[in-house]
């Protein structure tokens, strides 16, 4: 597939002329094989039917017999120096799932309306699906203007109503164009029967569309579809989902975490190519062969993707049975597939009335939309749709049928944007003991020392030594170690990005309570992401939060490997391991930086205590130990 190909889904109510439109596009631009048209004309004559351009597109005999489109048909079409993929989708409500499948891969959309019928239920439903899938390039084509006597007022009324509706749901149309697909009017050339229309014909308007989400600046993602051997080479075949693939580029395969660089790019009848762009289906060879399987995703180094078994998404459900918590489904994204189950539902919207419904039950009925949380049975690789569209769209399969589709909002457990705590009827209570009273009793204020760094950097060693020293000088202190917390209050959490975020959130709340009680609390957690540490600072309070960056090079940490975790991660026995598979974001402005490849734990603790005394955190009870000073 060409990298600059613009994918356009064609939607609309049944019998509004979608297949006819595509058939005319192909014929009027000389891109329909003559023998195919001849064959269809002969069959129509034999069956006593009038020839219709729609028959050129219908893939199944059942469709020709019934006069409807059942499956989504993809047609490549060129015009004006640009290449398009036209996706003709069904209009029947019963086949909405095929429409979602087709729309899930599109950059833009044409929505057809019948000039005689105007806006109907499917127009609203399809518009909401397109909005949900983040398709912002919308053209409304008002078809069958011949049956409305090419009336300008009729067109103006439909344009106002359709444009207003799309604007209200956040996708104002790029153009509203009057056409007659059957006679080819205002498709490729302007129609003399509609002189009152001053805009471009439909094909001209398509030339103005751009695949805005695929600029080449997006993070690199290459989805592996198959691995095979050819001419003594191991070729990893797949599709460039976003960004640019370059020969010699360093890549990392997720979720396995294996890394190497691209040796060659293989493309049929195009030897020696050095780059491939978004949408290209190519093969690659690697500098060192790796046991990579279908479904893995190659990403650029330092271009973080989410590897998680938890998905927060906006979904449109079309299954015969409601989407229900506890029932098993299949989750498909790119070449990946995993079993999944519904965890929770929020913000359900009735697709007919578009009103919010009661979300107290963990279920979504057929043809409704909603925000959901899905639990996968294994970690998959994905992105938020707003960041990498191709890796943020998915479908759900119930049994063997595609029954839902949606876009990924994120993997955090923190809830959905805009959902306020007051909705949950939860209130906070203040203690009757003031902070000053606690400070006077303890001899020092409450505060939190947040140790962050790579695995093996020395966080736990420093935390234990610091706790001992502060306790010996009279400070009321307690150290919260990551491993200990995971054996207790956080034993239900794994190591996905979502679980890590929840792990840090809970720790922040606990540390905040310790600090509020007037105690000194020390945390020793990797806490790899700046956003999570920022939230921890906000939870605990900036005045009581001391961020300590335990800075140690990865190669030193890996050489130490006190628990043997790096070795297991390199062998693929541990996934999503910070420093190997998952990134570590260094603190932007830490209060203290400790280079533990250059100083020992004793010197590191001394540096922290010196900082605490300068800030008045140890109070009057802090006492120096001469013996300790000499160490």
Image (tube, rainbow, N blue to C red):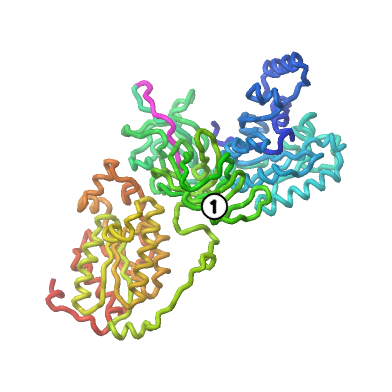
Secondary structure of residue under mark 1: strand
Left/right placement of residue 26 relative to residue 470 reads: right
**Residue at (74% x, 33% y) in the render:** 15
Q: Quadrant of residue 84?
A: top right
Q: Where is residue 498 in the image (x, y as percent from the top left)?
A: 41, 53
Residue holding disc 1: 371
Up/down of 485 relative to 13, above or below: below
Left/right placement of residue 313 relative to residue 607 reads: right
Q: Which of 497 and 221 is in front in this view?
A: 497
Up/down of 553 relative to 470, above or below: above
**Residue at (32% x, 32% y) in the render:** 289
Q: Is residue 549 magenta?
A: no
Up/down of 217 relative to 21, above or below: below
**Residue at (39% x, 43% y) in the render:** 378
Prevailing secondary structure of the magenta residues: strand
Q: Does the magenta stretch include residue 226?
A: yes
Left/right placement of residue 124 relative to residue 337 reads: right
């Amino acid at each position: 597939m060409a990298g600059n190909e613009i994918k356009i889904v064609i939607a609309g109510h049944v019998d509004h002329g979608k297949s006819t439109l595509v058939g005319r596009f192909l014929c009027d631009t000389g891109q329909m094989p003559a023998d195919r048209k001849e064959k269809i004309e002969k069959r129509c004559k034999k069956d006593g039917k009038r020839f219709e351009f729609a028959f050129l597109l219908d893939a199944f005999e059942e469709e020709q017999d019934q006069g409807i489109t059942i499956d989504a048909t993809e047609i490549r079409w060129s015009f004006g120096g640009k290449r398009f993929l036209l996706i003709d989708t069904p209009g029947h409500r019963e086949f909405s799932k095929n429409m979602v499948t087709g729309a899930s891969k599109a950059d833009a959309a044409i929505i057809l309306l019948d000039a005689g019928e105007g806006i109907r239920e499917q127009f609203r439903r399809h518009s909401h699906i397109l909005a949900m899938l983040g398709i912002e390039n919308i053209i409304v084509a008002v078809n069958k203007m011949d049956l409305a006597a090419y009336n300008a007022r009729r067109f103006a009324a439909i344009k106002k109503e359709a444009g207003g509706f799309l604007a209200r749901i956040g996708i104002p149309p790029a153009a509203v164009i009057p056409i007659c697909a059957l006679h080819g009017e205002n498709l490729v050339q302007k129609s003399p029967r509609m002189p009152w229309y001053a805009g471009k014909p439909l094909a001209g308007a398509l030339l103005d569309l751009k695949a805005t989400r695929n600029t080449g600046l997006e993070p690199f993602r290459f989805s592996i579809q198959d691995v095979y051997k050819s001419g003594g080479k191991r070729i990893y075949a797949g599709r460039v989902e976003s960004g640019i693939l370059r020969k010699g580029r360093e890549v990392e395969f997720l979720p396995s975490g294996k890394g190497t660089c691209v040796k060659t790019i293989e493309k049929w009848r195009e030897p020696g190519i050095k780059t491939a762009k978004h949408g290209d289906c190519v093969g690659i060879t690697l500098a060192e062969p790796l046991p990579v399987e279908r479904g893995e995703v190659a990403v650029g180094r330092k271009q973080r993707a989410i590897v998680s078994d938890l998905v927060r998404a906006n979904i449109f459900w079309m299954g015969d049975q409601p989407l229900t918590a506890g029932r098993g489904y299949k989750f498909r994204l790119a070449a990946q597939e995993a079993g999944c189950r519904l965890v929770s539902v929020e913000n359900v919207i009735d697709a007919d009335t578009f009103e919010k419904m009661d979300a107290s039950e963990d279920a979504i009925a057929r043809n409704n939309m909603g925000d959901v949380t899905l639990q996968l049975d294994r970690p998959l690789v994905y992105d938020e749709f707003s960041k990498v569209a191709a890796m943020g769209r998915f479908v759900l399969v119930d049994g063997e049928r595609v029954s839902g589709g949606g876009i990924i909002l994120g993997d955090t457990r923190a809830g959905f944007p805009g959902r306020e705590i007051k909705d949950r009827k939860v209130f906070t209570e203040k203690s009757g003991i003031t902070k000053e009273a606690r400070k006077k009793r303890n001899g020092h204020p409450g505060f939190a020392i947040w140790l962050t760094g790579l695995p093996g950097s020395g966080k736990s060693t420093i935390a234990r030594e610091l706790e001992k020293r502060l306790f010996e000088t009279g400070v009321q202190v307690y150290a919260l170690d990551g491993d200990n917390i995971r054996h207790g209050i956080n034993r239900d959490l794994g190591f996905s990005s979502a679980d890590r975020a929840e792990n840090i959130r809970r720790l922040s709340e606990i540390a905040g309570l310790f600090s509020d009680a007037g105690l000194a609390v020390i945390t020793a957690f990797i806490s790899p992401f700046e956003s999570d540490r920022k939230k921890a600072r906000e939870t605990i309070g900036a005045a009581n939060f001391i961020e300590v960056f335990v800075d140690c090079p990865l190669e030193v940490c890996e050489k130490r490997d006190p628990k043997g975790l790096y070795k297991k991660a390199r062998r693929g026995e541990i996934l999503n391991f910070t420093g190997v598979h998952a990134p570590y974001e260094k603190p932007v402005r830490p209060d203290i930086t400790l280079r533990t490849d250059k100083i020992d734990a004793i010197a590191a603790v001394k540096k922290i205590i010196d900082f605490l005394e300068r800030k008045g955190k140890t109070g009057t009870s802090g006492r120096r130990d001469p013996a300790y000073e000499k160490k």
